[in-house]
Amino acid sequence: MPSPVGASKSVELLRFTTCGSVDDGKSTLIGRLLHDSKLVFEDQLQALERSREQRGEAEVNLANLTDGLRAEREQGITIDVAYRYFATPKRRFIVADTPGHVQYTRNMVTGSSTASLALVLVDARKGVIEQTRRHSYIASLLGISHLVVCVNKMDLVSFDEEVYQEIRHEYTAFSTRLRIKHTSFIPMSGLHGDNVVERSARMAWYQGEPLLSFLEDVHIASDWNLQDARFPVQWVVRPQDDSHRDFRAHAGQIASGVFRVGDRVVVLPSGRPSKIKDILLLGRSLKTAHAPLSVSMLLEDEIDVGRGDLIVPVENLPFIGKETEAMLCWMHETPMQPGRRYLIKHTTNLTKAAIATVHHRVNVETLNEEQASVLGLNEIGRVSIRSSTPLLYDEYYRNRQLGGFILINEATNATVGAGVLLEPAKSPPLPEYTDYAI
């Protein structure tokens, strides 16, 4: 996407996702946002015009800017997750346009897993329906802090304020049971651009910001966990030449928190203590490094550290255990089988695991807990997981980077489930080596 003059590479990045039911106008809204912000290439506009002429349509279909699959254009629905990058002078954006059909709920989970903000679209004619509730619950489950309810297609209800207020009241009553920190509402018409980039003269009763201004101004810096320093080791750097024989660094991305040279740390799960000797970023030494920087960390002591290990401060340990509680979304046509062995991918660690117990299934429309022994495709429930090696984790709602995981079928390598780890009823015992008095 072209960037406006003056857009800086250093401006803050916002990842957001679209949610809602089929035909609520998610793809059209994103297309309108890009088009009215002058962020579409000329050849893309020409391609849209050719498509309009071939189909004999009266207007250009802006949804085709994100619906890239042929099947999507033929059926008029989104199937896969479409990622689009764009930038304004104030902020950079990555948007995940996710499908609304219940059949593709797993795609919505994938597209929303890294988002800080979700746009939940509601058709003004239909109001809050089951899929609206389902996607809102999933956004809450995934720990998305900011939710914007876009009451779309206001042009089809004559821009009636009363319709908007009724939907706002209904959604607010439902959302009080969700784990969402900030909820906002914007009435709009994605098709005609009302309250998308510019304020709508046809809804003078709405005194808030249009969507683009809201996205540019929403505060997301506090969404990062800078309290719990966590460094999952991805790679051990050992140069091959003899001149650097003693060099040993541990490379990876800081998942959360802040590390400083001289900090007392412990390597988990072994429990071996040490101090940070140096932190390198592209060959340059740093005194301090924070999430989400990718760095190489040098320790003062020779410790056996490998991929999947976790470096943390000695005074701030994560949960450590082979038995964990989680909320799990099942993403495969074959139902989950308690007791069957899967692979669990958590940070940089990959180990074997099994679902020990299904405690309940969540009815995503009523949010009630229902008795269940298995989970089927797109179902969400609370489970107990038993892993062959200890998981090193924080509760997901405190630290998304240390609390999320996926389950993999070890025979087919297919991702079959995704979930969030919960705080255990009691803290597990510390590792065997716990001489933290350095």
Image (cartoon, rainbow, N blue to C red):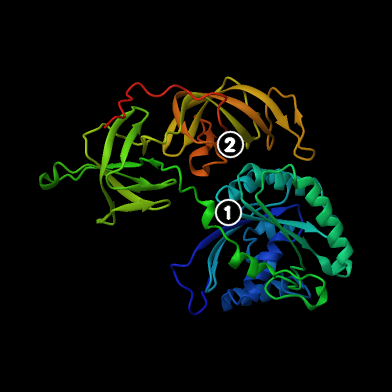
| Residue matched to label 1 | 116
The vertical placement of 401 against 342, above or below, is: below
| Image location of residue 327, percent across then percent down | 62, 33
Toward which corner of the image does residue 45 lie, by quadrant? bottom right
Q: Amino acid at mark 2?
A: Gly
Q: Residue at x 45, y 42 (%)?
A: 228
Q: Residue at horizontal 55%, vertical 39%?
A: 396
Give neighbour class at mark 2: few <14, some 14-19, many 20+ (Cα, 10 Å): many
**Relative horizontal placement of residue 158, taking residue 336 as reference (left or right):** right
Viewer-proximal residue, 173 or 385?
173
The percent position of residue 282, horizontal first and vertical second, equals 28, 57
Kindly identify the residue that appears in the image at 67 percent across and 75 percent down.
50
In the picture of the structure, the residue carrying the numbered disc 2 is 419
Q: Say if 89 sits above or below 186 in the image.
A: below
Q: Which residue occupies the extreme left position in the image?
A: 243
Disc on the earlier residue, 1 or 2: 1
Tell me the quadrant of the picture where the C terminus can be found. top left
Q: Secondary structure at mark 1?
A: loop
Q: Identify the residue at horizontal 31%, vertical 42% (top origin).
A: 263
Q: Pointer 1: residues within 10 angstroms few (<14), some, or many (20+)?
A: many
How many tags in the picture?
Answer: 2
In the rendered structure, which amino acid carries the disc numbered 1?
Answer: Ser
Give the alpha-carbon distance from disc 1 to disc 2, as whole Å.
17 Å
| Mark 2 residue element | strand
Determine which of the numbered discs, if any, sits on residue 145 in the image.
none
